[in-house]
Image (cartoon, helix red, strand yellow):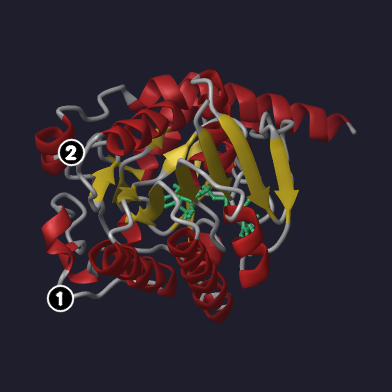
Amino acid sequence: MKKALVCGAGGFIGNHLVNALKLKGYWTTGVDLKLPEFSTSCADEFVQGDLTDPILCNEVVGKGFDEVYQLAADMGGAGFIFTGENDAAILHNSASINLNILEACRIHRAGKVFFSSSACIYPDYNQLDPNNPKCSEDSVYPAQPDSEYGWEKLFSERVYLAYKKQYDLQVRIARFHNIFGELGCWEGGREKAPAALCRKVARCQPGDQIEIWGDGLQTRSFLYIGECLEGIFRLMESDFCGPVNIGSEEMVTINELAGRILSIAEKEADLRHLPGPLGVRGRNSDNALIKQTLGWSPNQSLDIGLAKTYHWIADQVKKKDQQ
Ligand code: NAD
């Protein structure tokens, strides 16, 4: 039986990843500051602890793993990473986790090590035109991410690649583009646009307006969790170390995203645009490299994942509002 360690197993993607690894027959150890919020973990063993502590990382990784998935990060949507208020914590905590995990993987000779990087590493200057953003993997330099969160991911990518080069550690690096789905954070300040809009639409009564940050003409693509997991497994099974985009190429404006959720909910509402933290003007996954290297790319329509996510969040909102 293969053994996998999932760092960040209490978070949205980590929790889904543990479930998927269990279905594949792995023995899994999860580690996180917290347990998953919306389900119990399927991990065979769950260590609740702080991965900024090198002693804990050494202890956990020292149990011996064929595969290590490093997803733990100080993380959130635009309301968390673009305000500037959390920058020092984001840089310090996430970089510490990555340095500690890599060093423990080197010492204990872990098998393959997966690192979840982000589309936030791409330069601001290539994402000014909402209709024509450039996010091919090789466009990352000269570097100019628009957030400290992006700078930390870029720094950590380099550390993973340096460990590969110097210590022959088998690393795999993916740059995720806006992953969404059920069991994700949907309120409280760390939620991302799809979950926040699903919550607003679920609570929307006739005559209400849906609040959108900015003019809503900023573009993004959103990838459903199922296809993200498929991409992670395909990358891990391949000989390609990345970095490679794992994202959807179905680019929409935030206004369109709201419209699609309203139509899934069979509701009508006007949009009200307010000032708020925004991030880059346009972003889309470029899937040329993933197609070339893995012979696969995500292709599910956004509406399929959105419908599942909306119905799950609407259910959560209903339960909460009845309390
Ligand atoms: P998440 O916030 O739900 O999960 C991250 C987990 O890391 C949380 O459960 C958190 O408690 C844990 N964590 C943070 N600091 C820790 C510490 N010191 N010790 C132990 N655990 C700690 O985020 P997610 O959406 O599941 O994202 C997973 C990974 O993918 C992150 O690295 C994130 O940066 C990356 N990513 C996600 C997206 C996305 O759209 N969700 C996009 C790009 C990259």
Dots 2, 1 in contact, CB < 8 A: no
The amino acid at mark 1 is Pro
Question: Within 10 Å of the Cα at label 1, are there few (<14), some (14-19), or many (20+) other Cα atoms?
Answer: few
Q: What is the number of the mark on residue 171? A: none
In the rendered image, which residue does mark 2 sit on?
290
Of residues 215 and 188, the one drawn nearer to the viewer in this rendering: 188
Residue 142 got which mark? Answer: 1
Give the total of numbered labels: 2
The residue located at (42%, 75%) in the rendering is 148
- Seen from the viewer's position, the closer of residues 131 and 124 is 124
- Residue 29 in the image, given as x and y percentages of width and height: 63, 41
| Image coordinates for residue 322, horizontal then vertical, percent | 87, 29
Q: Is residue 280 left or right of residue 204?
A: left
**Residue 206 visible at all:** no
Image coordinates of residue 296 in percent, x first then y, are 19, 27
Q: Looking at the image, which is closer to me, 285 or 193?
A: 285
* 227 over 293 or under it: above or below: above
Q: Where in the figure is residue 76, as x and y percent of width and height?
A: 54, 57
Asked whether, in this view, residue 318 is left or right of residue 295, the answer is right
163 versus 191 height, above or below: below
Quadrant of residue 225 in the image? top left
Q: Report whether residue 9 is seen.
A: yes
The alpha-carbon separation of the residues under discs 2 and 1 comes to: 22 Å
Q: What residue do we see at 41% from left, 71% from top?
A: 152
> What is the crowding at mark 2: few (fewer than 14 residues within 10 Å), some, or many (at least 20)?
many
